[in-house]
Amino acid sequence: MGLVEYTLFAFMVGLTSCGLAGSAMELISGQRLAFAEPYVSPAHLLRSLFATACAGPLMFANEALDAWRQGRISAPALISCGCTATVWALALGVVLIDIASRAGILLGSADFSA
């Protein structure tokens, strides 16, 4: 595979994991995904960091679309937010692939013989 295929694969991994995490969080809480309670809170920093890292691109896109519908941002700003969410999903995919790769190497080097 070439660089383009690796990049697309990383983007799709990030987008898929973001969508799965965001959908699960919405189903569990019953509220729309956003940078607000119950997902992001100063009282629960680690939980907020984990939620933002996993579903951040989807949260960001939801917030940008809401701001655009209410007229708080312009169309170029919305496009900029979309590009940022895309790069964020790509970065998330790269991190997840790296974690999976390292976990596979660690599991592959373990001696499971009795």
Image (cartoon, rainbow, N blue to C red):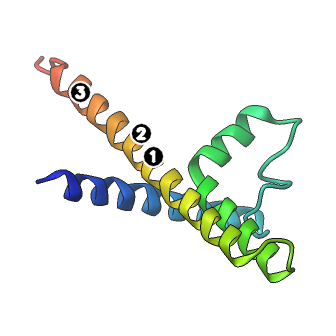
The reply to whether callout 1 and callout 2 are in contact (CB within 8 Å) is yes
Tell me how many marks there are: 3
Q: Secondary structure at mark 1?
A: helix
Work out how far the residue at label 1 is from the one at label 2, CA to CA, in angstroms: 6 Å
Image quadrant in which you'd find residue 49: top right
Report the mark closest to the observer, 1 or 3.
1
**Farthest-out residue, bottom:** 69
Residue corresponding to mark 3: 107
Residue depicted at 46% across the width and 61% down the height: 15
The disc, 1 or 3, on the residue closer to the chain's N-terminal end is: 1
Which mark is in front, 3 or 2? 2
Measured as percent of width and height from the top left, residue 96 is found at 40, 42
Residue located at (24% from left, 33% from top): 104
Mark 1: amino acid: Ala
The mark found on residue 95 in the picture is 2
Q: Position of residue 69 (x, y in %)?
A: 80, 82
Say which quadrant the C terminus sits in.
top left
Identity, as a three-letter code, of the amino acid under mark 2: Val
Estimate the x, y position of residue 14 in percent, counting from the top left: 43, 55
Q: Nearer the viewer, mark 1 or mark 2?
A: 1
Q: Do labels 1 and 3 touch, CB within 8 Å? A: no
Q: Secondary structure at mark 3?
A: helix
Mark-to-mark CA distance, 1 and 3: 24 Å
> Residue at horizontal 30%, vertical 60%?
8
73 lies above or below 69:
above
Q: Could you tell me how far apart the alpha carbons at marks 3 and 2 are, in whole angstroms?
A: 18 Å
Residue matched to label 1: 91
